[in-house]
Image (cartoon, rainbow, N blue to C red):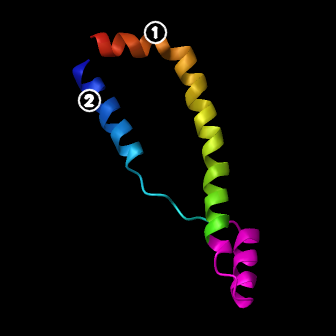
Amino acid sequence: MATLRVIFLSSCLYLLGVVNAAAQCAMCKATAESATEHVDKGIGEGLNAGIIYLMMIPYVLLASVALVFFRKKIVALFRG
């Protein structure tokens, strides 16, 4: 039981320390490339921030649902 607690806490700390990923879809890449031709270099950072924002929403919703359904087991895990 203690090892499960250590694994859970270490995975939570790992997820908090993850560096922002910079990913782009094909359409976003095309927009960013055309923007650099027109000397608008700030659009790439905005696109990456928007992609990260849209990517996080399903994970936050899934984590919220998991917390609602498994809250008794999570509380029992920390009480030992």
Q: Is residue 1 visible?
A: yes
Q: Judging from the image, what secondary structure is the residue with disc 2 in?
A: helix
Q: Main secondary structure of the magenta part?
A: helix
Kind of residue at badge 2: Val
Residue at left offset 61%, top offset 69%: 45
Residue 33 vs 63, above or below: the answer is: below
What residue type is disc 1 on? Answer: Lys
Quarter of the rendering containing residue 69: top right
- Span highlighted in magenta in the image: 24-44
Badge 2 is on which residue? 6
Of the 4 image quadrants, the one containing the N terminus is top left
Q: Earlier in the sequence, mark 2 or mark 1?
A: 2
Give how far apart the Cα atoms at labels 2 and 1 are: 18 Å
Where is residue 26 shown, x and y percent of the image?
72, 70
Query: Residue 24: in sight, yes or no?
Result: no
x and y, in percent, of residue 6 in the image: 26, 29
Q: Secondary structure at mark 1?
A: helix
Q: Circle 1 is placed at which residue position?
A: 72
For image coordinates 64% across by 75% down, the residue present is 42
Reply above or below: 37 against 46: below
